[in-house]
Structure formats: C-alpha cells, structure tokens
C-alpha cells in the first residue's frame, strides 16, 4: 500500500512538473500555473511546497520560481530562482549561474544550468539562473550588453536580498562555455560602461568568487561577431585575461582536456594571467572530459592545481582523483570563498 501511495504521488509530481528532466533533477516548481512568478508570494509558495507530500517523496528537492522579470519593461529575458527545500534563520550565500550557447543560443533552464543550479541549491545556496541578450543575424553586436544583463542579475539578487534570505555580501558567479566567459567578465572586469558596467547603479554587481566552466577566453576564436565595436582595442577588452588584476576575486577554472569546442589552451592562457596577477585560483582538468558538463562529467578522473599567496610567497597544492565527479571540489571552493 505504501509503495502504491509513493508511486501515485511521484506520478502526480511528474505530471505537475511537465518535464522528465525536472523530476530526475528533483526540481519542484512552486508558483501556481495561473499566477505571475513574482516575489511577493515567494515565502507562502515555498512554505506550501515544503508541506506537500510530493516534496517529501522527492528526495531532497529544490524549489524553483521560473521566469521572473529582472531587466525591466520591454525585455523578454527572465531569470529562474532556485531555493533549498529547508528554511534558514540566517541569510544564505548566493550564486548566479549563466548559461552557454555560443553567445547565440542556450537558455537558463537548459539541462546543464538546471542540474548545476539544483545541486548548488541542494547544498544550501540561493541560486539564480539568468537569460541575457543573444546575438542574432539581425542584431549580432550584443557585446557588452550581454555582460550588462548578467551584472543586472547580480544587482537584482542584492535588491531582493531580504525576500530571498540572501547575504548580499556573499555572492559568486558561475557559468559554462559562453556563460563561463560572461561569469569571468562579471568577476574580473571593472564596473565601466564599455564593459557592461554601471558605476552609478544603486546596487553593486561585484562578486566574491568566479566559477568558470570551460569558458571562452579568447575572441579570435569565439565571440568576435558580438563585439559592438570593431578594432583591436575592443577585441583586447573582450578577453577576460586583460582584466586579471590584483585584488580580483578567486577563480575556479574547470575544463576537460578532450574539449573540441573551446580548446583547453584558452583556460591555460587564462590561468597564466591569473597567476601573473597573483589572483588566487584553482584549475581543475577533467581527464577525457568533453565540452558541456555539469558537476558529474564523464571522464577518467581529474587533476586540480590550486594557487594562492601567503605572505607574498606562492603556495601550490595539487590533487588527483580517479573519478570524474567534481561536486565536492566545487562545493569546497564555494565554502572557502563565500561560505555555506
């Protein structure tokens, strides 16, 4: 009888979610289908979701509020909010995740974005996954507006920190591929208009850590068509390594050595720039890892090299694993930089 009850509840949950991947990833939509996904009812919806038997049946679910406006009137791009399924008495740290797609496609609710966002929310973080302006044939030159959109997602998190139970002083940014590039630019580039910044904004877009999943780092191979300006100065400004300066937040680079879309050499060049600027960083290479992975990539293991400075002296720590899963490394980096 209990088995039948559990099966029935899971069936109802699957139908409610409307997507097999969401059930697999244990993501539970909390807004009623007939209501606007805003924050005024967030607390009520989250409490109601925690009280439902379906949330108990789904092991360690996370709650998602999809398609929330954050860029203002006239913008079609939205964000998804992921919350842990447990309440907290103190503000939680947060992470913005930025999807990839070659600057021309992709979506905040793609499998990778959903998987990573859900895993981080399950670990106790408030997570936002955002869309941003995409390059099209009719409007190819979207740089640096795409960076500006991602910065605005950070500002939105700070503006609504109270409703989200978010610690505005502990926010990291992460992204994959083109999203990895955008995460690097949000984290490393100064708050200047020509780099998607807004020095006069009420809320800061600064972050305390950057997670770069096999991100684009060189415009000569990727993203040149998105540049709003032509010429060598714009192309140089496009590259994250140009903005690697002392005092920047720590960076975690994750890349597969079998990536044929974004060559791992781009991450090696970025790592060299971080090292030269004495920016604390960690470079994790997934052996046999290809392009596009979440926290459980396919591969034969990984090697990680962490570099920091103590009293002016470089300290290097190397680790190896015979299994490709990187969940523990990502969570350890976040715990070290923004806490848990």
Image (cartoon, helix red, strand yellow):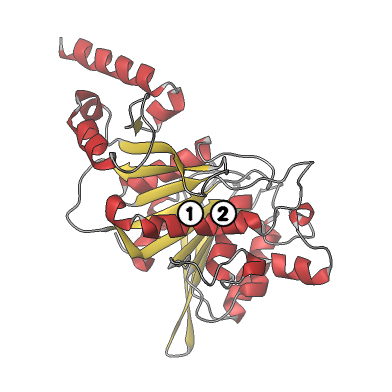
Q: Nearer the viewer, residue 317 or 174?
A: 174
Q: Give the total of numbered labels.
A: 2
Q: Callout 1: 10 Å neighbours few (<14), some, many (20+)?
A: many
Give percent across and percent down for residue 133: 63, 47
Residue holding disc 1:
153
312 versus 193 height, above or below = below
175 versus 60 height, above or below = below
Image point (50%, 46%), residue name: 130
Can residue 165 be seen in the rendering of this structure? no
Image point (32%, 44%), residue name: 83
251 versus 7 height, above or below = below
Q: Quadrant of the N terminus?
A: top left
Q: Nearer the viewer, residue 185 or 304?
A: 185
Does the CB distance between marks 1 and 2 fall below 8 Å?
yes
Which of the labelled discs sits on residue 149, or is there none?
2
Q: Nearer the viewer, residue 36 or 208?
A: 36
Can residue 156 be seen in the rendering of this structure? yes
Give percent across and percent down for residue 307: 49, 74
* Residue reaching furthest to the right: 231
Image point (79%, 62%), residue name: 229
Give percent across and percent down for residue 190: 58, 73
Question: Dividing the picture into quarters, in which one does residue 82 lie?
Answer: top left
Q: Callout 2: 10 Å neighbours few (<14), some, many (20+)?
A: many
83 sits to left or right of 295 = left
Q: Quadrant of the C terminus?
A: bottom left
Give percent across and percent down for residue 280: 49, 74
Helix, strand or loop under label 1: helix
166 sits to left or right of 113 = left
Helix, strand or loop under label 2: helix
Image point (76%, 46%), residue name: 139
Which of the labelled discs sits on residue 227, or is there none?
none
């Amino acid at each position: 009888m209990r088995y039948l009850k559990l099966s029935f509840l899971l069936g109802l949950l699957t139908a409610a979610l409307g997507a097999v991947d969401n059930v697999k990833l244990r993501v539970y939509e909390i807004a009623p289908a007939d209501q606007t996904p805003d924050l005024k009812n967030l607390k009520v919806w989250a409490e109601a979701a925690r009280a439902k038997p379906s949330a108990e049946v789904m092991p360690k679910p996370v709650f998602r509020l999809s398609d929330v406006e954050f860029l203002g009137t006239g913008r079609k791009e939205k964000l998804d909010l992921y919350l842990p399924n447990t309440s907290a008495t103190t503000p939680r740290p947060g992470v913005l995740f930025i999807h990839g797609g070659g600057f021309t496609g992709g979506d905040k609710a793609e499998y990778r974005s959903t998987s990573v966002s859900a895993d981080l929310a399950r670990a106790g973080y408030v997570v936002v996954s955002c869309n941003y302006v995409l390059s099209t044939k009719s409007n190819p030159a979207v740089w640096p507006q795409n960076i500006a959109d991602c910065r605005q997602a950070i500002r939105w998190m700070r503006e609504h920190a109270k409703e989200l139970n978010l610690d505005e002083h502990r926010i990291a940014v992460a992204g994959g591929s083109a999203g990895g590039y955008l995460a690097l630019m949000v984290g490393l580039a100064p708050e200047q208009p020509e780099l998607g910044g807004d020095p006069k904004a009420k809320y800061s877009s600064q972050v305390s850590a950057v997670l770069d999943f096999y991100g684009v780092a060189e415009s000569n191979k990727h993203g040149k068509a998105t540049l709003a300006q032509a010429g060598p100065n714009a192309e140089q400004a496009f590259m994250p390594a140009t903005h690697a300066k002392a005092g920047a937040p720590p960076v975690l680079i994750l890349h597969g050595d079998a990536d044929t879309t974004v060559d791992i050499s781009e991450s090696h060049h970025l790592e060299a720039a971080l090292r030269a600027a004495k920016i604390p960083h960690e470079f994790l290479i997934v052996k046999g890892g290809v392009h596009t992975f979440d926290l459980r990539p396919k591969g034969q293991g990984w090697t990680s090299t962490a570099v920091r400075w103590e009293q002016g002296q470089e300290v290097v720590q190397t680790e190896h694993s015979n299994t490709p899963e990187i969940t523990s490394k990502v969570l350890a980096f976040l715990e070290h930089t923004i806490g848990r």
